[in-house]
Image (cartoon, grey):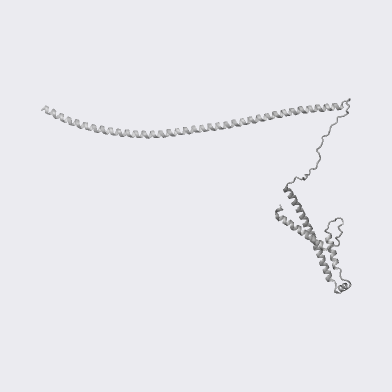
């Protein structure tokens, strides 16, 4: 009986033990899972913290590098400015050396001139003493005046070695002067001709004003002197334009309007020739 009870108690204890073991395993699994989740969360948090710290460290390193670059740039600028100052000092030193050398040269030149002036003054004093010496047989010192420049004509003179272009220019200037003289003479002759024509018109008007009876009486007595008066007026105005040359009256008094007309035709021909010269390209 007791053995049976013991057996049954053992069976009951085994079942209870089995159920207890299962409960403990499930609890352990739950605990392990929770622990795993907790550890995962912690790991994730550590990763985030680590990433943030890495970014911060990188930014800090970048700032440090920027500061180092700025310091390096400032140092390079300082070095460049120092180099420029050194070059300026060198150039100023060279200029100072050149200036000092020039000053030395000027000092030597001034000293040389001073010595030369002293020598000249001594020589002058010696000459004065020689001149004022009582036993001087020469009596005085003769000083020659310097010769002046040779006097000559400052005006340039033309020679035979003139270029062809200059010859053409001279010829053209002469022709222009001739043309001007001919133009002036033609204007004078035209004025004189106009005056003579006016005189002739006045004489014709006076002739028309003469009464017919007086004209008939004059015609009976031998005619009027209109032709002689006209010739006298024409000769008087043509002879005023002649030049005062010797013996000009010989053979001129007998001339009439023919000589004046020939002179006028000659002037017109000369003017025509000058116009042809201008057309040929001689005008400057």
On screen, residue 141 versus residue 276, left or right, reads: right
Residue 181 is situated, as x and y percent measured from the top left of the image, at 78, 55
Residue found at x 49% / y 33% = 69
Front one among 31 and 281: 281
State which quadrant residue 145 falls in: top right
State which quadrant residue 222 falls in: bottom right
**Figure quadrant of the N terminus:** top left
Residue 195 is situated, as x and y percent measured from the top left of the image, at 81, 63
Front one among 16 and 119: 119
- Residue 88, compared with residue 239, is above or below; it is above
- Residue 224, compared with residue 156, is above or below; it is below
Q: Residue at the left extreme?
A: 1
Residue 225 is situated, as x and y percent measured from the top left of the image, at 86, 68
Residue found at x 70% / y 55% = 280
Residue found at x 41% / y 33% = 54
Disc tally is 0
Residue found at x 13% / y 28% = 7
Residue 96 is situated, as x and y percent measured from the top left of the image, at 65, 30
Front one among 226 and 70: 226
Front one among 239 and 263: 263
């Amino acid at each position: 009986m007791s053995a049976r009870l013991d057996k049954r108690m053992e069976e009951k204890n085994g079942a209870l033990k089995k159920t207890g073991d299962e409960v403990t395993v499930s609890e352990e699994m739950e605990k392990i899972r929770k622990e795993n989740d907790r550890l995962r969360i912690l790991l994730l948090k550590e990763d985030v913290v680590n990433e943030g710290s890495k970014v911060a460290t990188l930014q800090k390193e970048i700032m440090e590098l920027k500061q180092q670059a700025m310091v390096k740039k400032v140092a390079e600028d300082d070095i460049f400015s120092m180099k420029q100052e050194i070059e300026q000092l060198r150039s100023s030193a060279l200029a100072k050396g050149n200036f000092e050398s020039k000053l030395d040269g000027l000092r030597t030149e001034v000293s040389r001139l001073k010595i030369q002036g002293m020598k000249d003054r001594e020589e002058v004093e010696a000459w004065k003493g020689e001149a004022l010496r009582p036993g001087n047989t020469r009596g005085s010192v003769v000083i020659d005046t310097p010769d002046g420049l040779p006097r000559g004509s400052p005006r340039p003179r033309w020679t035979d070695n003139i270029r062809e272009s200059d010859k053409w220019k001279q010829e053209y200037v002469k022709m222009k002067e001739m043309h001007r003289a001919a133009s002036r003479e033609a204007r004078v002759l035209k004025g004189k001709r106009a005056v003579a024509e006016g005189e002739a018109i006045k004489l014709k008007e006076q002739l028309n004003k003469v009464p017919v009876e007086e004209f008939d009486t004059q015609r009976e007595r031998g005619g009027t002197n209109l032709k002689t008066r006209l010739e006298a007026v024409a000769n008087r105005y043509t002879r005023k334009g002649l030049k005062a040359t010797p013996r000009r009256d010989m053979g001129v008094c007998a001339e009439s309007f023919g000589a004046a007309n020939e002179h006028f035709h000659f002037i017109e021909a000369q003017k025509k020739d000058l116009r042809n010269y201008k057309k040929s390209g001689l005008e400057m």
